[in-house]
Structures are given as C-alpha cells and as structure tokens.
Amino acid sequence: MDPEKCPKCDAAVGFDEVICRGCGAAIKRQRLLGEILVDEGMISRDRLEEALRLQKRRLGEILVEIGACKAEDLDRAVQLQRLGRTRADIYRRQLRFALVVILMLVLGLAFALLRLERDAELLLKLEKETLGVDEVAAIISDPRSFHKFDALRSLAHFLEDPRAIKILDQALRSDSWYVQLYAAHLARRTRDRSLVGALVPLLIDERGLVGPVAHQALQAVTGAKLEPSVKAWREWAAVNGVGLDGKRP
C-alpha cells in the first residue's frame, strides 16, 4: 500500500506519522475501517482479526477463480503460512542439508584415502618383512584387519620370541580358516605345548584343510603319535597335564 501525501507540500507521509517532515504541517490520517469499528465498540479486536483471516482466505479463492494461480499453489502457500516459512526458508534448509551431505562425503573420502595410504605402507612393510613382533601382534589382534595372513609370514622370523607363541595362539583361534591353516604350519616349528589348547579344536574341520595340518602340528609340538581325533588328544592332555579349553575358534 502506497504512503499518503502531505496536502501542502505533496511529500510522502507514512501511515504512522502525524507531522509532515517536509513542511511540518499536521497530517490528519484517514482511519481504517477496522480501527473505527473497534474504537467505536461495534466489534471486538478478536472478531476483526478473524474477519481479516477470512478475507485472506477469500483472496486466495479469488486468485484461483481468475486464473492468477493454481489450487495447488494456493494449498502450498497456506501450508507455508501455517509453518511460518517461506519458499526461501525451505530452499535455505535444503541447501544446508546438501552442504552437510557434501561435507560428510568429503570427510569420508579423506578418511578412505588416509586408510589406503596407511594400508599401502603396511603392505610394503609386510612385503619386505620388516615388521616387528609388536606390530604383527597388533595386526593379528585387530578384528578389522585384512592383513593377518601377511603378518603371519613376518612372524616366521620371530618364532623364538616368547611373544610369538601368544600371537600364534590368537591366530589359531581366528575366524579365518586360511589364517588358522598358516598358523598351524608355523606351530609345527615351535615345539611349544601351550598351543595344544588352540590346535585340538581345529581337528574338527568341515573343509578337510585345517584339520590335517593341525594334527601334524599336534604331533610336532607334543611328540605323541596319536590318531586325529579330539577324544584321543583330550585323553593325552589329561594324562600329561596340558590344559584344553575345548572351544571352537
């Protein structure tokens, strides 16, 4: 709505101004019909506000009737009015959400690149077999590691280290059959009876791959020539005082 003008100097005057800023003349502002009705006590202000709301709704119906907008546009405008948001607010919210998604993707890519770089360095060390016992132990104990088999190859150089026996015991209890298989191969060279507890459960091998090697390892570390059965080795362990946990890996 355009502002009123001063009757003397024709300067623009706001609706809330009572004195012209140009010439200083008093401005007699025309009162709105709603104000007059409320001031004269003809209606309450609540009824006036209700009438104004109905007037806005009627305005939307008129716009649809004259083809100025579609009914879908009017419904969307009503929804935005109820939510107290404009189309720009929704666009800004969608933009913020898109920026968060992009940021998460960038961070994920950065972490993936860092992990690839770290894995590349680790694989290089594994290939050159330059890892120490502690580094091999960390790889074997990490459930998320994909390099346990390669780490065991490095462990072959440290079988005389007492820590290597604990690493082998942990590898024999791994969920990976090929890690168990290679660990059983290494166990044959240790002559350490403490590995019996982890080797005996491996005799039950549905694939027929780990079981025979585990039996050879049991014969090597104990010097006993028994048949490849869990029962026979349990009886041997009971006689020789070797502890068995009897748990499947």
Image: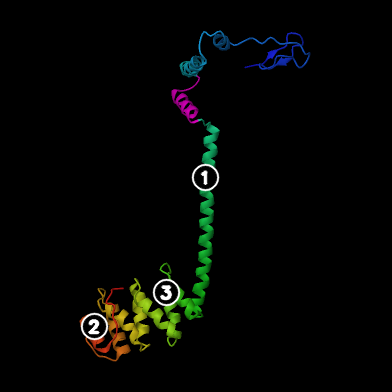
Q: What's the CA distance linking mark 2 and mark 1?
A: 62 Å
Q: Amino acid at mark 3?
A: Ile
**Which residue is at 42% across, 67% downward?**
144
Side (left or right) of 180 relative to 31: left
| x and y, in percent, of residue 193 in the image | 33, 87
| x and y, in percent, of residue 75 in the image | 45, 25
- Indicate which disc, 3 or 1, sits on the residue closer to the N terminus: 1
Instruction: Please name which of the two marks, 2 or 1, marks the residue nearer to the observer.
Output: 2
In terms of secondary structure, where does tag 2 sit? helix
Q: Which mark is residue 171?
A: none
Q: Amino acid at mark 1?
A: Ala
| Residues shaded magenta | 68-83
- Location of residue 32 (image quadrant): top right
Q: Main secondary structure of the magenta part?
A: helix
Q: What's the CA distance linking mark 3 and mark 1?
A: 40 Å
| x and y, in percent, of residue 101 in the image | 51, 48
Specify the quadrant that holds the N terminus: top right
Q: Amino acid at mark 2?
A: Arg
| x and y, in percent, of residue 41 in the image | 53, 9
**Which residue is at 30% across, 89% downward?**
222
Which residue is labeled 1 in the image? 98
**Which residue is at 54% across, 54% downward?**
106
Q: Which mark is residue 140?
A: 3
- Indicate which disc, 2 or 1, sits on the residue closer to the N terminus: 1
Is label 2 in contact with label 1 (beta carbons under 8 Å)?
no
- 103 relative to 14, above or below: below
- Residue 193 within the magenta-colored segment of the rendering: no
**Which residue is at 53% across, 56% downward?**
107
Which residue is labeled 2 in the image? 234
How many discs mark residues in the rendered view?
A: 3
Q: What's the CA distance linking mark 3 and mark 2?
A: 27 Å
